[in-house]
Amino acid sequence: MFPRAFHYHRAGSLKEAATMIEQLGDEAKLLAGGQSLIPLMKLRFANPKHLVDLNFVPGVSYIKEEKNTVRFGALTRHSDIENSTAAARIPIIHDCAAGIADVQIRNRGTIGGSLAEADPSGDWAVVLSTLDTTIHCVGRKGKRSIPLSEFIADAYTTSLEKDEVVSEVAVKVPAKGSGGAYLAFKRTAPVYPTASVAVNLVMNGDTCKDARIALGCVGLTAIKASEAEAALRGQAINDHALNTAAEAARAAADPQPDMRGSVDYKRALVAALVKRAIAVAVRRARGEQVELGHLYA
Ligand SMILES: Cc1cc2nc3c(=O)[nH]c(=O)nc-3n(C[C@H](O)[C@H](O)[C@H](O)COP(=O)(O)OP(=O)(O)OC[C@H]3O[C@@H](n4cnc5c(N)ncnc54)[C@H](O)[C@@H]3O)c2cc1C
């Protein structure tokens, strides 16, 4: 289906985009990669009267590493991140970027658009919630920085004001001795996962000093699996710790039944994914190069 007719506007800067969406009112939408918005418009679930295109704003697609922080410009495409040195250095970033849909979608979709969409099935929010991530925004009145934990308020809802545009996603480089892994279970590549798990561990020899675990697609937003994290902290990662963490993650999952599976099926999936992701995170924390791809039905 064709989208309903709309007026097209091209922003020359993020500040101009912020001013435009404020002035054009509730029926205006920003356009980044268009990989969430355009399908919704074609299905006529979204019918904006005005689109403000960010794709011609100079200097908003970049990956920079400064003072132990990796900075992604909001318009940085998933595929640019997949192939970046930052992704080589922080493998969980590669797991995420390389596993999003197919190459066409990765070539257009952006990290800023993905977080702003706050789709409960989106990959970036799950992965970045296990790292120290800050979202930088530009508004008509100036700049604002929001921790990711406060940025995503609910399904498809962020704490952005109407006149704010995401300008940058800043991620702290994990401490030495850290290892992370992101694993999703999917029916095919160009669909969202049935369930996914992100794990970041800080190891001291065989003992886990700190753990962060987030579950994707099994709640309205990424779920922090606090009990699973607690089951690993201060422990050697053995079968007992893995099983305890997996059971805690299963209990934390809050999935909806749908064509991808029942509630019990998705919970069982989460438990299995947590174990596998922890095992890879431990190996990576030891400095091993472990390639990880999503699992397909
Ligand atoms: C078939 C298909 C499969 C997909 N599979 C996956 C998947 O497996 N995993 C996954 O994570 N994603 C998946 N996606 C979504 C994809 O990752 C999108 O790129 C992403 O969700 C949105 O990014 P975008 O740049 O395309 O944003 P757009 O579609 O352009 O915009 C999305 C929303 O964010 C707003 N927005 C965009 N940029 C900004 C900004 N800088 N500041 C403020 N608001 C902004 C827009 O106004 C809009 O409301 C899939 C998409 C398709 C079509």
Image: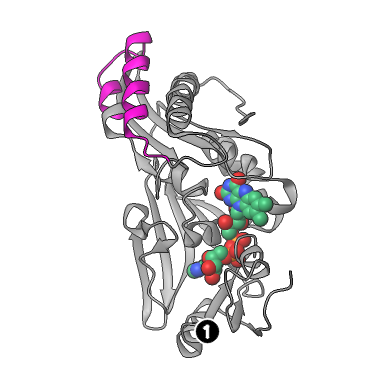
Q: Main secondary structure of the magenta part?
A: helix
Q: Where 34 sits versus 57, above or below?
A: above
Region of the chain picked out in magenta, as a range:
229-255
Determine if the magenta segment contains residue 246.
Answer: yes
Position of the C terminus, as image quadrant, is: top right
Going by the image, does 273 lie left or right of 98?
A: left
Asked where in the image residue 5 lies, by quadrant, the reply is bottom right
153 vs 282, nearest the viewer? 153
Crowdedness of circle 1 by 10 Å Cα count: few (<14), some, many (20+)? many
Q: Which residue is mark 1?
A: 16
Q: Residue at x 27, y 16 (%)?
A: 235
Q: Where 241 sits versus 142, above or below?
A: above
Residue 290 visible within the image: yes
Q: Where 123 sits versus 71, above or below?
A: above
Going by the image, does 187 lie left or right of 211?
A: right
In the rendered structure, which amino acid carries the disc numbered 1?
Glu
Q: Where 263 sits versus 51, above or below?
A: above
- In this view, which residue lies farthest toward the bottom? 23
